[in-house]
Amino acid sequence: MKRVMALLMALLIGLPAYASTQKKVLMIIAPENFRDEELFRTKGVLESCGAKVVVASTRLGIAHGMLGGTYMVEKKYTDVNWDEFSAIVLVGGSGATIFWSDPLIQRMIKSAYEKGKIVAAICLSPVTLAMTGILKGKKATCWPGVGWRLSKYGAIYTGKGVVVSGRIVTAAGPYYADEFGRAICRLLGYR
């Protein structure tokens, strides 16, 4: 209701009030084998709470989901200004393991976290967060088969569906995509 009123007031008096309150979220997917629900359902939840979502990957063009979904990627994660975003979200799926051996994205994620951004990852992607060191000593979750990898990098693996540790949100997989999105929305200040 507050967003509707802000939009109406902006239209009536000609101020860009709504645009200034809209938070931007960068979602990063693998170009092959991202997990469909973790992109589409999480993105839908984020947009329904009022966030503007930008999806990026390692390359431009059509990205392919594990279940046959596709997404036309128009931004490479290296070509966007991460400072413009309030949250960085890593989508999982088997393709997300490419980020485990990508020191550039790991440095960018760590820098974003150090600058006060919300950082979130689902399924296999929390391993990427763990590899940056930002999960050390923090509770986190991921796809059950790789929970040991979180522990290896100093995280406290919980095995829960969704875990919020300060500005970090982790989720166990596609069944938790909606809850994952709602947790990010709450950290962004949306209700």
Image (cartoon, rainbow, N blue to C red):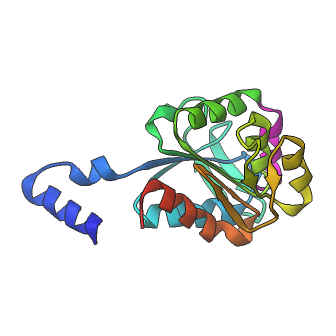
Q: Which quarter of the picture shows residue 129?
A: top right
Is residue 152 toward the left or the right of residue 51 in the image?
Answer: right
Is residue 57 toward the left or the right of residue 50 in the image?
Answer: right
Q: Name the spot of residue 79 as percent of width and height, x first.
A: 55, 29
Is residue 51 toward the left or the right of residue 32 in the image?
Answer: left
What predominant SS class does the magenta segment belong to? helix
* Residue 66 is inside the magenta segment: no
Q: Name the spot of residue 162 as percent of width and height, x first.
A: 69, 65
- In the displayed structure, 112 sits above or below 51; it is above
Q: Name the spot of residue 57 as percent of width and height, x first.
A: 65, 41
- In the displayed structure, 150 sits above or below 164; it is above
Q: Residue at x 87, y 55 (%)?
A: 147
Identity of the residue furthest to the front in this view:
137
Does residue 45 appear in this view? Answer: yes
* Residue 94 is inside the magenta segment: yes
Q: Nearer the viewer, residue 110 or 88?
A: 110
Q: Residue at x 50, y 56 (%)?
A: 187
Does residue 69 appear in this view? Answer: no
Question: Which quadrant does the C terminus fall into?
Answer: bottom left
- In the displayed structure, 177 sits above or below 75; it is below
Q: Nearer the viewer, residue 173 or 148?
A: 148
Read off the magenta span: 92-102
Q: Which quarter of the picture shows residue 100?
A: top right
Q: Nearer the viewer, residue 122 or 159?
A: 159
Q: Residue at x 40, y 61 (%)?
A: 50
Total tally of numbered discs in the picture: 0
Q: Name the spot of residue 85 as percent of width and height, x first.
A: 47, 41
Q: Residue at x 20, y 48 (%)?
A: 16
Question: Which quadrant does the N terminus fall into?
Answer: bottom left
